[in-house]
Image: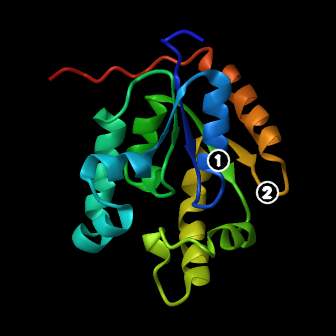
Amino acid sequence: MTSECANLYLVGFMGTGKTTVGRGVAARLGFEFLDSDHEIERLCGRTVTDIFAQEGEPAFRRYEREFIEHGHPATSQVVACGGGLIVQDGMLELVRGKGVIVCLHASVETILRRTSQSRARPLLEVDDPAERIRTLFAQREPIYARAGTTILTEARPVAEIVNHVLRVYHREARGFQPEVPATP
């Protein structure tokens, strides 16, 4: 692959496998792998949990926008996006202008199982995490459905999912032209 390859953005709900699959895809493509949450933590010098606790969710969403707009290279990256990144107004379109989007999907039951042991998910720090997942999933699902090709990640080996993502990426990256921001 050349240095001018379109970025790949993996989107979807928490626990759908964006980080695991993203690492595998990046390795196969020879791209750099970035996790938007980890990059925001690195840039801010605090964990996502701390950002939520100290500044609130709106501040974290601003950091996500800044990361997509200016916080990573424009080519040859696989970016695992936080689950709420594309649900913000205008973010799906912004990401779409930066690269190929693939949405990873799993059932609510699978997501509950995969996230049940995690302490690093501030949106689940509530009395009833299962209900919170169901509510967020229902709110976000229509946006995920518009994002791009959707790939189911449950009950499939990671290697099979990686291969499926690679097929979609190769197909969609061929004609990708990044959107150039208008100059004022």
Q: Is residue 15 left or right of residue 156?
A: left
As drawn, the label of residue 3 is none
**The C terminus - image quarter:** top left
**The N terminus - image quarter:** top right
* Residue at the image point whose x is 66% and y is 49% from the top: 104
Residue 59 against residue 71 in the figure, above or below: below
Q: Which residue is under mark 1?
A: 20
Between discs 1 and 2, the one toward the N terminus: 1
State which quadrant residue 30 falls in. top right
Residue 119 against residue 145 in the figure, above or below: below
Q: In this view, does 123 lie to the left or right of 141?
A: left
Residue 82 position, x and y percent, is 48, 53
Residue 176 position, x and y percent, is 54, 19
Q: Could you tell me which secondary element the residue under label 2 belongs to? A: loop
Q: Does the residue at mark 1 contact the one at mark 2 (Cβ under 8 Å)?
A: no
Tag 1: amino acid = Thr
* Residue at the image point whose x is 47% and y is 85% from the top: 126
Tag 2: amino acid = Glu
Residue 142 position, x and y percent, is 59, 57
Residue 154 position, x and y percent, is 79, 57
Structural distance between the alpha carbons of marks 1 and 2: 13 Å
State which quadrant residue 139 falls in. bottom right
In-front residue for pair 96/24: 24
Q: Could you tell me which secondary element the residue under label 1 belongs to? A: helix
In-front residue for pair 146/122: 122
Q: Which residue is under mark 2?
A: 154
In-front residue for pair 177/2: 2
Count neighbours of disc 2 (C-alpha within 10 A) and say few if under 14, some if 14 to 19, many if 20 or more: some
* Residue at the image point whose x is 28% and y is 46% from the top: 43
State which quadrant residue 103 falls in. top right
Count neighbours of disc 1 (C-alpha within 10 A) and say few if under 14, some if 14 to 19, many if 20 or more: few
